[in-house]
Image (cartoon, rainbow, N blue to C red):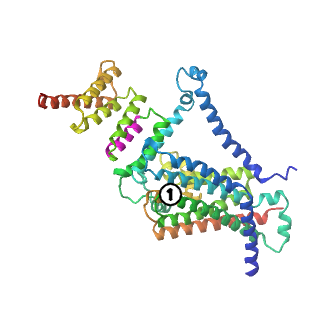
Amino acid sequence: MSGNSSPNRHWLPLAALCTAAPAAIFALFLRAKGPSLAQIASGEDALSVAFGDTKATISRAMVHKADSYFHSGMDTKGVSFADPYCWINDRVHADTGEHCHLEGEKAVELLPWLWAAVRSDPGNVDAWTTAIYVAGREMGNRALAARLIAEARLHNPDSLELAWKHGMFLYDSGKGDLRAAREVFLTARELARKLSHGDVSRLGEHDRTIEHFVEECIHRIDDDIKKEPPQT
Amino acid sequence: MKIFLRQMIAIVRLSFIELLRRNDLYALLALALTLMIPLSMASPFGAGGAGRYLDEVALLLVWGFSLFIAVGAGSRLLPPEFANRTIYPLLAKPISRGRLLLGKYLGAMLSSSAAVLLFYFLFAGSVLLRGGTLSMALVEAVVLHILFVALAVAVSLLGSLIFTPSANLVLSAGMLTAMFFFGRRLPEYAQGVSSALAFVINAVYALAPHAEFFDMRMRVIHGHGPVDAVVMVIVCLYAVAYVAALLCVSTAIFRRKKV
């Protein structure tokens, strides 16, 4: 009988693996929902502990995909090689050499990937800020942008960048609610001081730049408010 | 010539019956519907109107399923005949080993291509249902996809004559998948590594089947229009030449194989 094995039998290990892998992931997910494992993981979601890096990697890949969609599927490869295979690839794939963007309402095509990115890793601030930009600036959907900012800040209360984005959203190039924007910028300044333990020069370069912008915005709003005619 | 054609038609017909008799196709269709229907109802962040991601996921499934079917069909052409000893009555008939192999290859290739056509028919239906339009790029994408299937069947057929069935499945599917996703990046990977490793990567780049040549997904999804006719002809010639070379090697091995 040994030589009479069914050809379908060779698929069995692969099929078993394909079945077992999602089952194992699902089992871990269910266990993560239970209180006992959550305690073991010191209050953190056990799924985050088990697959933290994987989730962050998937999230980054989703942002990369959204970027590819923003460029209408154009590949942003930097190097081009002078061989026949590369020549064929450059012509079969969508590399037309033109630089084009998905703008306006069409930018809605980016949202599914950004949604997947923030669901994979809610701590991915880049994904949140891109989604806010797409909703607010490209699609002109301020209600959606406001909802995204609120959700993003809920997941990332210590993000200086999101606090600044929130303020800028309310400021709306000077046309928005200046007092509400000022309040958010003041909160952002407090956050910067808290993160740097009172010495903002200890912040990283990116956060230091944002802190500088926050100060600029506060001064600008103060000037704008001074110029406002007194209310009767 | 008449006898040759009759022999080929008989073998091809058997391959179609084999594909329909196996449950792979139905299982894959059910899986595709199970994944795509809930996905089509999703509205990320509550904003509707996005459709390209559905096309992307659908086409990725079509590619995955076609690889599954093509590699499976190619790898199952000869080993079961040896295992079940049904190769003896086949070889006893007035047909050369070369013709038998060619007939079996054509049958597997055509039946796998029929499955691909069915998948694309469903894809086109989903695009039209969502109010989209079909372009010439989709026709070219189908043609290139069928050429990829022809290549995949030939690769797994050759592998089935060299490796054990399990090893063949893993190696054939693994190599084609790796080339599909990373083939065009190989020259970049060869830069900045040791010269020995660069030699290996460049050798793979030169010799391995370039599955990525047949991937027009981005053009279809983002509406970039069809590929230039000259490029299409070159890719077709590449596929035909590669398949012919693989079939020649397979025939040579099959002729020397002791049964």
Q: Nearer the viewer, residue B98 or A54?
A: A54
Q: Which residue is mark 1?
A: B217
- Magenta range: A125-137
Judge left or right: residue B37 versus residue B258: left
Give the residue at the far top of this rendering. A197
Q: Position of residue B101 (x, y in %)?
A: 74, 67
| Residue A127 inside the magenta-drawn segment | yes
Tag 1: residue type? Arg
Dot 1: what SS? helix
The quarter of the picture where residue A231 lies is top left
Judge left or right: residue A155 versus residue B255: left
Looking at the magenta stretch, what is its main secondary structure? helix
Q: Nearer the viewer, residue B20 or B222?
A: B20
Q: Nearer the viewer, residue B249 or A14?
A: A14
Q: Position of residue B9 (x, y in %)?
A: 73, 73
| Residue B90 inside the magenta-drawn segment | no
Give the chain of mark 1: B
Above or below for A163 versus A194: below
The quarter of the picture where residue B251 lies is bottom right
Residue displayed at 78% across by 72% down: B96
Q: Position of residue A230 (x, y in %)?
A: 11, 28
